[in-house]
Amino acid sequence: MDIDLIIPQEFKKYFWDAEFTKLNFKEHPKYILSKLMTYGEIEAIQWILKNLPQKEITNFVNKYGNTKLDRRSYLFWSKIIDENDLWKN
């Protein structure tokens, strides 16, 4: 993913095992997505849906979801990627 996004400060709580100020979406997309998709609350889900292209989320879930997400999150996001009306246009 070659997307340069700033992670909102309120999401810092999901990255307890990393130095938040050094996280960069362009360099660490799989790590950031796995944390937000696994532990994120509704605000994190909305942020993902608003800021990332559906294709990128679909690719992440299909390629890495079964290893980077817990089972519950993987099943949830597998359903989400099929719901076209949830994505920004």
Image (cartoon, helix red, strand yellow):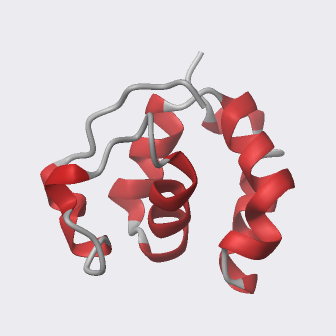
Q: Position of residue 71 (x, y in %)?
A: 75, 84
In the rendered image, the vertical position of residue 20 relative to residue 67, given as above or below: above
Which residue in the rendered view is the most extreme toward the top?
89
In the rendered image, the vertical position of residue 32 relative to residue 51, given as above or below: below
Q: Is residue 49 visible?
A: yes
Which residue in the rendered view is the most extreme toward the bottom?
71
Where the N terminus falls, by quadrant? top right
Relative to 84, 22 lies left or right: left
In the rendered image, the vertical position of residue 68 relative to residue 1, given as above or below: below
Where the C terminus falls, by quadrant? top right
Relative to 64, 19 lies left or right: left
Front-most of residues 61 and 50: 61
- Quarter location, residue 30: bottom right
Q: Position of residue 83 (x, y in %)?
A: 77, 43
Q: Position of residue 24 (x, y in %)?
A: 33, 42
In the rendered image, the vertical position of residue 18 relative to residue 84, given as above or below: below
Residue drawn at the location 81% of the way across and 72% of the way down = 66
Q: Is residue 75 visible?
A: no
Residue drawn at the location 54% of the way across and 64% of the way down = 37
Q: Position of residue 63 (x, y in %)?
A: 84, 53
Report how many numbered discs are placed on residues in the image: 0
Front-most of residues 25 and 14: 25
Residue drawn at the location 77% of the way across and 42% of the way down = 58
